[in-house]
Amino acid sequence: MKYIDEYRDAKLAKDIARQIAAAVDPARSYHFMEFCGGHTYAIARYGLEDLLPANVQMIHGPGCPVCVLPIGRIDAAIALAMRPEITLCTYGDLMRVPCSNGSSLLKARSAGADIRMVYSTLDSLSIAEAEPNRQVVFFAIGFETTTPPTALALRFAIAKDLPNFSIFSNHVLTPAAIQSILENSDARTLGNIKIDGLLGPAHVSTVIGTQAFEVLAEEFDTPIVVAGFEPLDVIYSILMLVRQVNDGIHKVENQYIRAVTNLGSEKAKREVANVFELRDSFEWRGLGAMPHSALGLRPKYAKYDAEKRFDMVTPAAQDNPACECGAILRGVKKPSDCKLFDKVCTPDSPMGSCMVSSEGACAAHWIYGRFRGPGKADESSRTTA
Amino acid sequence: MTMKAKRSRLDLRNGRIDLSHGAGGCATDQLVKGIFHKAFDNDWLRAANDQSAFAVSAGRMVMTTDSYVVSPLFFPGGNIGSLAVHGTINDIAMGGACPLYLSAGFIIEEGFPLAELNRIADAMGAASREAGVPIITGDTKVVERGKADGVFISTSGIGIIQAGLDLRSDAARPGDAVIISGSIGDHGVAVMSKRENLDFDTDIISDCAALHGLVAAMVEVAGSSIRLMRDPTRGGLAAVLNEIANASNVGLRIDEEAIPIKPEVAAACELLGLDPLNVANEGKLVVLVAPEFADALLAVMRAHPLGAQAALIGHAEADDHCFVQMETSFGGSRIVDWLWGEQLPRIC
Ligand code: SF4
């Protein structure tokens, strides 16, 4: 399998693991956060934790778009979908996220809402085209990677003159989230966590380039390695982080050179800039409201903006108080620290969003790693303020 | 002078199922005789009773039933008919039993082409003849258009277990060897490759096969040191291993590198974002055997055409959590779980 086997070469992985073991300073510990759920998944799926020395700890980050969407936004989408003229199109993972009053998009659908699962933005355009009497709303979520396709969908909708198509934008920006985590702004409530380095997002970087993270590495003295999602990518990127820490440097390095450049894709960035503008503030699950951390449609496209067109309101909804997703998304707690983990919360009956998507930290740990149980990981970094 | 009503012939080339084919009258009779009896041909069916009588030797019997709702109906390496025969024979064989007879029930959708029904019945007839397990009774129902997906088949079967053999799913013990009879995922990938919305090019054909011959050879050499056997159909190897672990209250530890997977199957799974461990098989079995018999059993399996790629993939261990764990090729370990969330529908 060309382009896959190369990144799954077990011998090479073991070799890199040996290099990591030789490189680490036994007198110190290394705490690296993987920002993306894709990395979390790869680490769990391939058992990479077992290849790392005990003093190298991986911390799961917030990088799953489903996990960081606050439930108020899903409540708003459900309220919209319950209107008889609306067809809401969404990606599969979102369907099962538990939100207020024990509801979810899946439950709303069984209660009569017209909610359809799509695999791409273009599927929702096709529905709008085929059913001109329905108001088709695309529930758009994701980081920088999924924003260009949403922008393109809007361009096609205009070109095809589809007046019954609109977008509920929930696109969020990675650098803002990384900044918030590195700032530890709400350490008082969630505890403090030491991060010695960060595995940066690969797919996001194909769009915005590595440059977008340089100021963060600089400002927070934190090495960042933009890492691909194959197991070899991940383990090699960890070696790169260890080396930076040992050398006392903190720069952005690009491990994923086969797809990522310094500047990213100018075309995609142009497409996004044409359609979207920064929101003043946006609520993230687990991270709270962050300024300039999300994208809304530009005013000139107001008639394609579902929030304006249908006067949507986002209720201030509370998460299940026992669910620790917020702390887990910041890396201050591990899934097994949650009292509900593996008791009432499993992939079969998720209580929080982290247990829904396969890239959610709780789901990845439950599906692939729950034999490790609580307490195997080093607790030294987790101090409650 | 008596006049026999003249019937129009069954148009096997262009005809379609209509509601009269299920009404129990002349058209039903014509359909059953013209397609099913012709394809399955045997003395029991020719006797045209509502049931079939047969003699059995002494011993314990097994009985099983299963329904087949595969989509698409025809796939590389088989169709819903051969699947229904092999699947039920295998369910009997997994009990260590020798299958004797099958029944077949059909639920057919109005409008279904007779030519396709004929192809399905022919495949069933061929599969049952080849396996030496006749279909001796059956039933046909027709439902209105839109109420079924072409055709559903339900097959039951009975068989006899040789004295002294008692395979139970709670029989695995720590230390037992876990053996699989060949490469995994072939059936699921073959079926998916023909899905309308997934159409991709692959030469993979379904592994759909009747395993009772292989099982007979295994029972002969390892007898009651075989703890249990399962065929990893829907849910794949992962589901079967979890079922075994839970039923027997043991953990299972398997080795990723030892599990046979064809490179084309691995590539297709990669493309579709699937784990081959969750993908369906229709001609493979998993056996747990006392460790001292593992080598002998492997040898006899490998000598059989349906077990040529048999491999020892792991062992059972004491574990109150009943986890199935896998040593990954990277040297790490992870849980092998049942599939959570979205299942690809109806591949067996
Ligand atoms: S285990 Fe469930 S309830 Fe607990 S943090 Fe994870 S998703 Fe939330």
Image (spheres, rainbow, N blue to C red):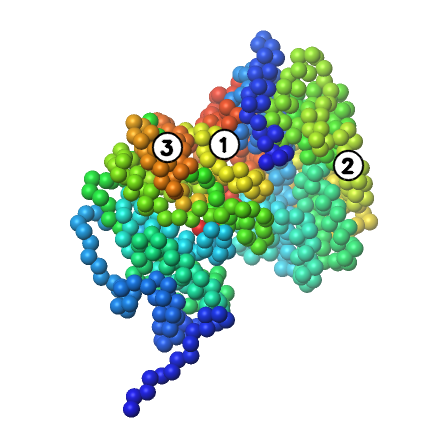
The residue beneath circle 3 is B178
What kind of residue is marked 1?
A: Tyr
Q: Looking at this view, is B235 or A314 the one in front?
A: B235
Q: Residue at x 21, y 47 (%)?
A: B60
Q: Mark 2 and mark 3: span between their CA atoms?
A: 50 Å
Q: Looking at this view, is B49 or A60 the one in front?
A: B49
The residue beneath circle 1 is A368
The quarter of the picture where residue A285 lies is top right
Q: Which of label 2 and label 1 is nearer to you?
A: 2
- Mark 3 secondary-structure assignment: strand
Q: Mark 2 and mark 1: span between their CA atoms?
A: 34 Å
Q: Residue at x 62, y 31 (%)?
A: A229
Chain designation of label 2: A
Q: Mark 3 and mark 1: span between their CA atoms?
A: 21 Å
| Residue farthest to the top, as pictured | A27
Q: Position of residue B315 (x, y in %)?
A: 37, 29
Q: Looking at this view, is A118 or A384 the one in front?
A: A118
Chain designation of label 3: B
State whether residue A99 appears in this view: no
Are discs 2 and 1 less than 8 Å apart at CB? no
| Residue farthest to the bottom, as pictured | B1
Q: Are marks 2 and 3 on the same chain?
A: no
* Beta carbon at label 3 within 8 Å of ligand 1: no
Q: Viewed as shown, does residue B162 lie left or right of B102?
A: left
- Mark 1 secondary-structure assignment: helix
* Up/down of A132 relative to A315, above or below: below
- In the drawing, what numbered circle is on residue A265? 2
Q: Which of label 3 and label 1 is nearer to you?
A: 3
Q: Viewed as shown, does residue B335 lie left or right of A66?
A: left
